[in-house]
């Protein structure tokens, strides 16, 4: 497991990182935890000539509130997400997902930005981002831009980030008190990546407790997180009761069927679990 | 550390493992930890094809890389006097095609070495390996086990039909007659899928040659360093044994995979002399999956004949065993002598006939993997017994009990060569049934089914043959050598003791158990005993550890050497006490004249006297040291009953292990905690075969599971608490009454779990599914539209 030779930089500011990236172009890879990149380099499937390590940039780390938004630094580790009270209050689906990634060692090194920017089609967090309606903040030499999660994931290991852009922040909109989110997955027995995973956000009407807003996304069945519009439509305006959720979740079967009958079945089960838990948290 | 048991002895006590302190704190010393100044590093260029002709190899660009010491191809090795790796076990009419450490003109499995690069750093070695250009002419690959026999492509031109051997055991005519007279005949085709051993420590080798003394030293991940030295020295490299030292230091797991002589270690041992510098190689996990010998891979048709009362009359077995691309060291004996001979199980089956075809394919070589042949035998016997019970409407517990070899029938001669020395199968089975509360469980199962919950109960009453291997018995079966063990006990002048054993520990805890044995027999503290193993430079000889043989064979050799020490200590005591040696009694480390226990000598006093040797009679040599070799007179036969209870979720096909009871009879036990640990690990590995693990290849011979991202080894959070117990029927074969415990769990658990899952699926008309029983496979089987009948 010996990678090809590469140069290494560890800038301490976002500006320095962006400048480096602009200079180095395609030959550089960003290191944001390394649990995907380093194995690829050791197998020599990836041979970047320059690795830019982001872990020395304090500004990229941590969770804070900014008005009606929860802002998560891209280099926040899974362990930090799991331990964060604010993450659990605002977006428990993130904690659901992060708490089941790898083992403690992995969770202490792996980061939310690393996972999201890597865009593995079986990863947990990209799908959670879509269900939360999160936005990705990309920083380049020309400044910042914000990309909605729905637009961010473009295919296997492919995102809307331009060459030279760095994912710096993830912004999760704060929802009303009557909102809840959850993530449920079936893991691959070896990799523990999601065989199928479903993330859901539900917001209930204050008085009637009917489903006011809902977002559902699936991982593991497509080249990117798949938004389950049919499931969402079946829930809007209804009470989030088990039978309603069951019927709605079953609508995922068609969407997920391309991945095979069994995965489609698992997707429905995960959707039912995630929606049920999200609804419970919304009460 | 020395926690004595109730009787005050450490023998039979759960003494904590003395080796754990260094392992758990990262202070183990494995091959890769050893660094000699000037060490160079080897990287192998490996075939990306399963089967191809090598047209040419161009190393010019790689050679020009700064830091490259040398690059060698197979042709250079052959020209340099390196022979093929031999097979250690021959069968009649077996084909033994040459196995060059580096392919010469043709590659036969993905990952086979094509060239080796040796460089100053492992990075440069890998960089240069990437620059070696090999021109391949790809050939069609032979992959599938069964159709290998009819495949037009030949893996080896010298093996028509890709057949390595055809082997039979038992009386075919008597078996045919049994089937003619049968009231019921049940049959099943089943596969025993290919597995990877996945030792935690990857294989590693470091070789160093001294020009000054003409000595070659090899540190290597080996379960049997003396066997490595003998075969590599005498057959592959032509290095004389007295100039060749093989050291297997701490070794992190083997499960069989580190018994064998591998190409990479031969190459570094040869190359160090060529370049005049030490050479090291450590496998990556990917290389482990591509090149460590794999296990199992059988396709079998089995038929069982029964009379009207459900008594077994005959068993007919036809197996195709995949051996991979080359014959690994013990490959021929695994699907034959370690498999066919165990087909009687714990049952009285008057007639058995087995025929096995060993086939070559373009896949990684297959050899012994924990259990080695015996899990394959136990699996098919325990499956066909369950299938028979279902088919004739018998209770799976009752049909087993009715067919057990009765306790008064031992020694019992099976129709497949072995003579079981001892056994008492009823009590172990009763204990297992009681522990699991079988009757109540069956009621719960019926109730659960009414509620749409699918619970299954799986029984496995297994037997295995350990204490490998009695030379008289295996010699009569065609082995070229016996597998005895040796021990040497050196008592130092202060009464401290070093025990040299030919057994090798790679997880088994010998440093603790053998110290318990020596401390008990000499009547001294465990803290005064050191166990040394794994170095041909200091240990006299050894056959190593596999086949659950260390305690039964290696332990007995130590026992015999200790007996010689005690005898000599008595003679020294007799000299000092001015008595006749036959009047000296040894008790708890004190030696005294019979009847006068107050006038005696302690072990330490006698040890000192042995080295001071003052006024010794002429026939008493100074010193206190003894050697012993022990060749068992028969195998030992551990047995037991394992019962698994599972629930299969209809919605997902997932299997939940609800309960697991294991009752094993491994004879006398030196350290119950260590035996429990072996049983636990074995059960986990066996469950993994039943439910998760499978090494698959695509039609082109590319491995699909060559990574821990896809090959699913068991993890603690998937397993239930194992409820283990033992019955003790001491083996009459060796003086310690020990049978062996290293493989029982693996052998017993696979059929127990598969039987449980198939039982859970009975309401869906499922009678058999091949392993691994993945959720997807079970979900498909439980769907009404495709439910199998």
Image (cartoon, coloured by chain):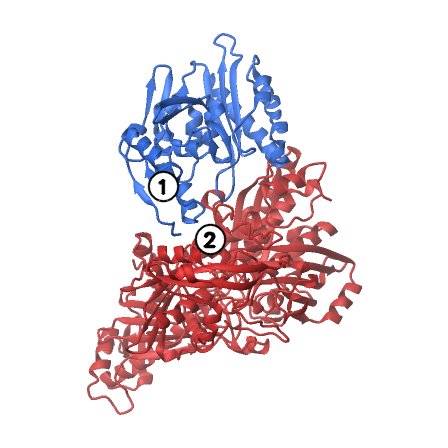
Q: Give SS at disc 1.
A: helix
Determine which residue is flagged by label 2.
B286
Measure how far apart labels 2 and 1 are at the Cα level.
22 Å
Q: Give SS at disc 2.
A: helix
Q: Which chain is blue?
A: A
Quarter holding the C terminus of chain B?
Answer: top right
Relative depth, front residue between B772 and B75: B75
Residue B241 pos. (x, y %): 39, 78
Residue B564 pos. (x, y %): 35, 79
Instruction: Residue at 55% x, 64% y: name it.
Output: B55
Instruction: Residue at 44% x, 29% y: name it.
Output: A96
- Residue density around tag 2, few if under 14, some if 14–19, many if 20 or more, within 10 Å: some
Relative depth, front residue between B626 and B707: B707
Determine which residue is flagged by label 1.
A105
Name which quarter of the figure residue B284 lies in: bottom left
Residue B624 pos. (x, y %): 28, 79
Relative depth, front residue between A163 and B565: A163
Quarter holding the N terminus of chain B?
Answer: bottom left
Q: Is residue B6 left or right of residue B633?
A: left
Q: Give residue B328's mark.
A: none
Residue B722 pos. (x, y %): 48, 48
Using the image, name the chain to which the residue with label 1 belongs: A
Q: Which chain is red?
A: B
- Residue density around tag 1, few if under 14, some if 14–19, many if 20 or more, within 10 Å: few
């Amino acid at each position: 497991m010996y990678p090809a030779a590469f140069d290494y930089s560890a800038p301490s500011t976002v500006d320095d990182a962006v400048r480096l990236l602009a200079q180095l172009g395609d030959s550089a890879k960003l290191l944001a935890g390394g649990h995907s990149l380093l194995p690829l380099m050791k197998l020599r499937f990836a041979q970047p000539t320059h690795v830019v390590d982001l872990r020395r940039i304090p500004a990229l780390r941590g969770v804070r509130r900014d008005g009606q938004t929860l802002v998560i630094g891209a280099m926040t580790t899974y362990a930090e997400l799991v331990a964060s009270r604010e993450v659990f209050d605002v977006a428990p689906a993130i904690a659901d997902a992060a708490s089941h990634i790898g083992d403690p060692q992995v969770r202490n090194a792996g980061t939310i930005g690393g996972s999201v920017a890597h865009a593995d089609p079986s990863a947990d967090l990209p799908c959670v981002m879509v269900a939360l309606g999160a936005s990705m903040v990309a920083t380049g030499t020309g400044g910042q831009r914000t990309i909605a999660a729905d637009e961010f994931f473009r295919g296997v290991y492919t995102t809307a980030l331009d060459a030279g852009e760095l994912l710096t922040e993830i912004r999760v909109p704060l929802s009303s008190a009557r909102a809840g989110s959850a993530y449920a997955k079936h893991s691959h027995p070896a990799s523990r990546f999601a065989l199928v995973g479903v993330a859901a956000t539900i917001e209930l009407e204050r008085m009637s407790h009917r489903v006011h807003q809902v977002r559902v996304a699936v991982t593991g069945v497509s080249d990117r997180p798949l938004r389950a519009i049919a499931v969402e439509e079946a829930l809007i305006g209804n009470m989030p009761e088990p039978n309603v959720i069951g019927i709605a979740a079953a609508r995922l079967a068609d969407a997920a069927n391309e991945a095979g009958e069994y995965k489609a079945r698992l997707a429905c089960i995960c959707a039912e679990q995630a929606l049920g838990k999200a609804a419970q948290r919304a009460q | 550390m020395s926690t004595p048991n109730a009787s005050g002895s450490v023998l039979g006590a759960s003494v904590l493992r003395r080796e754990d302190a260094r392992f758990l704190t990262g202070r183990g010393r494995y091959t890769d930890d050893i660094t000699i100044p000037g060490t160079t590093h080897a990287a192998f260029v490996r075939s990306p094809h399963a089967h191809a002709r090598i047209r040419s190899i161009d190393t010019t660009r790689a050679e020009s890389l700064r830091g490259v010491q040398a690059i060698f191809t197979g042709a250079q090795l052959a020209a340099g006097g390196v022979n093929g790796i031999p097979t250690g076990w021959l069968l009649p009419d077996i084909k033994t095609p040459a196995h060059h450490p580096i392919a010469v003109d043709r590659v036969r499995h993905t990952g086979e070495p094509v060239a080796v690069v040796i460089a100053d750093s492992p990075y440069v070695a890998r960089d240069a390996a990437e620059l070696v250009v090999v021109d391949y002419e790809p050939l069609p690959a032979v992959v599938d086990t069964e159709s290998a026999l009819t495949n037009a492509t030949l893996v080896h031109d010298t093996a028509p039909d890709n057949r390595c051997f055809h082997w039979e055991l038992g009386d075919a005519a008597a078996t045919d007659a049994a089937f003619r007279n049968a009231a019921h005949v049940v049959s099943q085709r089943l596969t025993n899928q290919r597995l990877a051993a996945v030792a935690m420590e990857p294989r590693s080798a470091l070789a160093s040659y001294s020009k000054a003394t003409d000595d070659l030293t090899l540190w290597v991940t080996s379960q049997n360093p003396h066997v490595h030295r003998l075969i590599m020295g005498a057959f592959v490299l032509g290095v004389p044994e007295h100039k060749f030292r093989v050291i297997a230091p701490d070794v992190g797991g083997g499960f069989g995979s580190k018994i064998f002589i591998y190409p990479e270690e031969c190459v570094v041992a040869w190359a160090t002399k060529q370049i005049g510098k030490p050479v090291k190689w450590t496998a990556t996990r990917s290389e482990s999956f591509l090149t460590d010998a794999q296990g199992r891979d059988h396709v079998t048709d089995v038929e069982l004949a029964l009379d009207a009362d459900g008594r077994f009359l005959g068993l007919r077995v036809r197996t195709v065993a995949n051996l991979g691309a080359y014959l690994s060291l013990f490959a021929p004996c695994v699907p034959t002598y370690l498999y066919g001979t165990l087909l009687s199980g714990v049952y009285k089956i008057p007639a058995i006939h087995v025929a096995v075809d060993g086939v070559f394919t373009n896949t990684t070589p297959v050899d012994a993997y924990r259990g080695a042949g015996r899990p394959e035998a136990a699996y098919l016997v325990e499956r066909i017994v369950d299938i028979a019970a279902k088919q004739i409407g018998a209770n799976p517990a009752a049909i087993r009990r009715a067919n057990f070899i009765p306790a008064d029938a031992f020694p019992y001669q099976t129709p497949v060569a072995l003579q079981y020395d001892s056994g008492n199968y009823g009590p172990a089975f009763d204990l297992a049934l009681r522990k699991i509360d079988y009757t109540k469980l069956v009621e719960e199962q019926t109730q659960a089914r009414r509620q749409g919950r699918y619970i299954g109960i799986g029984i496995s009453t297994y037997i295995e043959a350990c204490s490998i291997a009695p030379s008289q018995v295996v010699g009569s079966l065609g082995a070229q050598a016996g597998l005895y063990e040796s021990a040497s006990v050196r008592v130092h002048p202060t009464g401290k003791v070093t025990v040299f054993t030919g057994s090798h520990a790679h997880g088994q805890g010998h440093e603790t158990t053998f110290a318990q044995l020596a401390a008990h027999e000499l009547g001294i503290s465990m803290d005064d005993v050191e166990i040394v193993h794994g170095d041909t430079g200091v240990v006299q000889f050894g056959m190593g550890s596999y086949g659950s043989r260390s305690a039964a064979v290696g332990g007995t050799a130590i026992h015999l050497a200790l007996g010689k020490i005690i005898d000599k200590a008595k003679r020294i005591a007799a000299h000092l006490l001015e008595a006749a040696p036959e009047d000296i009694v040894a008790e708890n480390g004190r030696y005294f004249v019979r009847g006068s226990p107050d006038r005696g000598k302690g072990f330490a006093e006698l040890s000192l006297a042995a080295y001071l040797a003052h006024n010794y009679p002429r026939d008493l040599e100074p010193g206190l040291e003894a050697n012993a070799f022990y060749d068992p007179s028969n195998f030992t036969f551990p047995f037991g009953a394992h019962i698994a209870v599972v629930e299969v979720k209809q919605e997902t096909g997932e299997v939940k292990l609800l309960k697991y009871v294991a009752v094993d009879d491994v004879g006398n036990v030196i350290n119950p905690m260590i035996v429990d640990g072996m049983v636990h690990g074995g059960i986990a590995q066996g469950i993994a075969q039943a439910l998760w693990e499978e090494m698959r290849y695509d039609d082109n011979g590319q491995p699909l599971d060559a990574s821990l991202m896809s090959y699913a080894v068991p993890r603690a959070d998937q397993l239930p608490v194992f409820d283990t117990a033992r019955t003790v029927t001491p083996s009459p074969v060796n003086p310690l009454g020990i049978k062996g415990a290293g493989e029982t769990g693996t052998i017993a658990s696979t059929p127990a779990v598969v039987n449980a899952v198939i039982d859970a699926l009975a309401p869906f008309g499922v009678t058999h599914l091949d392993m691994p029983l993945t959720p997807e496979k079970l979900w498909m089987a439980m769907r009404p539209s495709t439910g199998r009948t």
